[in-house]
Amino acid sequence: MTFIHEIIPEDDKRSIDFTKISGRFKHRSKPSQWIIDRSQDAILLWLYPNREPPHEEFYALSIRGVVFNIAVLDIESKKPDGKLTLVRKIVRLTAANSSVGLDDVQKALSLAKEALLAGAKWDRSTYASNTDEIRVESEI
């Protein structure tokens, strides 16, 4: 299975403690949408945008209960034909718990790229039909 963007089912809203995923970035209410890969027990939640430059967006990725905090910078460029290229650049990925190993971090980075790409493709389908190419890269 792969990551999909979906409205969080009511049963999941009731059974999941979202404060364990979002940590210090607590939602005022439970999130209504997520990007999820049920086969890998991985959930990506958008937490909030940074309103100050460089305007990063912050996410939490939970993989089998292990939480990683992610900072992402979106970079758009216009091609000569007017179509857009969107690059979602992961600029930071940190484990909420310091006892994770390098393999866990590498797995988290791989899943974060996959989940962010799925989310960006869903975003494109809703408001940016002129986006021609979407990539997820990492500075890590």
Image (cartoon, grey):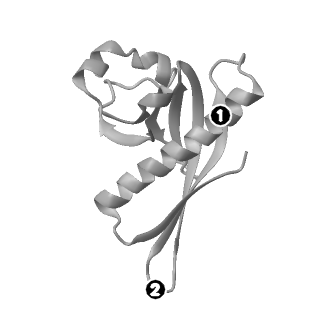
Q: Say whether residue 32 is left or right of residue 1.
A: left
Element assignment for label 1 = helix
- Residue 16: x and y in percent read 37, 16
- Which amino acid does the dot numbered 1 rest on? Lys
For image coordinates 54% across by 25% down, the residue present is: 63
- Which amino acid does the dot numbered 2 rest on? Asp
Q: Which residue is mark 2?
A: 81
Query: Would you call the spot at circle 2 few (<14 residues within 10 Å), some (14-19), or many (20 or more)?
Result: few
For image coordinates 29% across by 57% down, the residue present is: 126
Judge whether residue 118 can be spotted in this image: yes
User: Height in image: 23 above or below 136?
Assistant: above
Judge whether residue 50 can be spotted in this image: no
The quarter of the picture where residue 124 lies is bottom left
Q: Residue furthest right?
A: 102
Using the image as rendered, state which of residue 26 and residue 115 is in the foreground. 115
- Residue 107 is marked as 1
Distance of mark 2 from mark 1, alpha carbons?
A: 37 Å
- Residue 33: x and y in percent read 32, 36
Q: Quadrant of the C terminus?
A: top right
User: Height in image: 123 above or below 40?
Assistant: below
